[in-house]
Image (cartoon, rainbow, N blue to C red):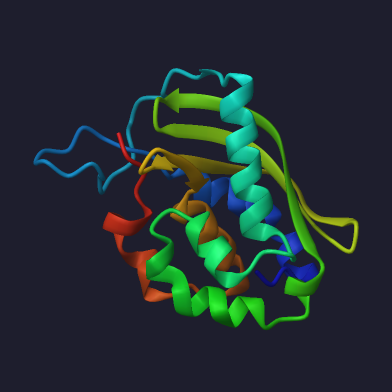
């Protein structure tokens, strides 16, 4: 993930972009939805094990020591972003990045709202940024919508970011 000073200045836009993420009670058998919910979900604090699992997913996904395969495994629908992750892994930023999660609230059994900070070389670039985590296949992962919001700030979101079957939060 490339985070430039320009991106850091646009961190407020992440809040706006992520505020639109959500789920609705759409029909069919899909576990994903295409529209945000009009109602504010009820949030409750995550237990320590859930918080640790989500923190690990964010640390793995944004961590400079992680391989592309590890980052892909830590991202919701990670295979849909494989080419982007390879390209991001070749940047100078990738060699010195990290992320920490500061708070986690559960929206449902499979969706969490959180705050995280992305750092590079120990300096916070995106501080206290809102994001989401989803439980996919029993494992907590960085929500695709959160990654897409960051890629949009960079100005180069891939087509997967326009596909709501990939970016929507599960119910």
Q: Is residue 58 above or below residue 156?
A: above
State the residue at coordinates (45%, 41%).
Answer: 139
Picture quadrant where residue 64 is located: bottom right
Q: From the viewer's perspective, tell me whether residue 43 is left or right of residue 93.
A: left
The number of numbered badges drawn on the structure is 0
Q: Position of residue 35 (x, y in %)?
A: 28, 45
Query: Which quarter of the rendering shows the C terminus?
Result: top left
What percent of the width, then of the height, locates residue 153? Answer: 60, 66
- Whether residue 109 sits left or right of residue 112 in the image: it is left
Q: What is the residue that sits farthest to the right in this orientation?
A: 122
Give left or right: position of 137 versus 63. Answer: left
- Locate residue 62, reporting x and y percent: 67, 59
Name the residue: 69% across, 43% down: 116
- Horizontal placement of 135 versus 61: left or right? left
| Quarter occupied by the N terminus | bottom right
Which of the pair 39/88 is nearer the observer? 88
Q: State whether residue 58 appears in this view.
A: yes
Location of residue 30 (image quadrant): top left
Q: Residue at x 68, y 50 (%)?
A: 59
Please name the residue shown 54% across and 34% down the image.
113
Can the viewer see residue 152? no
């Amino acid at each position: 993930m490339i985070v430039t000073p320009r991106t850091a200045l646009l961190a407020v836009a992440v809040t706006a972009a992520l505020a639109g993420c959500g789920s609705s009670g759409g029909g069919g058998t899909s576990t994903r939805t295409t529209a945000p919910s009009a109602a504010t979900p009820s949030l409750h604090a995550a237990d320590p094990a859930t918080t640790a699992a989500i923190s690990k997913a964010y640390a793995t996904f944004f961590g400079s020591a992680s391989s592309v395969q590890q980052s892909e495994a830590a991202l919701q629908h990670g295979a849909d972003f494989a080419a982007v992750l390879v390209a991001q892994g070749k940047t100078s930023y990738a060699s010195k990045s990290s992320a920490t999660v500061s708070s986690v609230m559960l929206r449902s059994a499979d969706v969490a709202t959180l705050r995280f900070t992305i750092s590079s070389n120990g300096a916070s670039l995106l501080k206290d940024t809102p994001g989401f985590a989803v439980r996919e296949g029993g494992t907590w992962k960085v929500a695709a919508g959160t990654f897409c919001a960051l890629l949009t700030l960079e100005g180069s979101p891939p087509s997967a970011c326009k596909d709501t079957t990939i970016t929507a939060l599960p119910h």
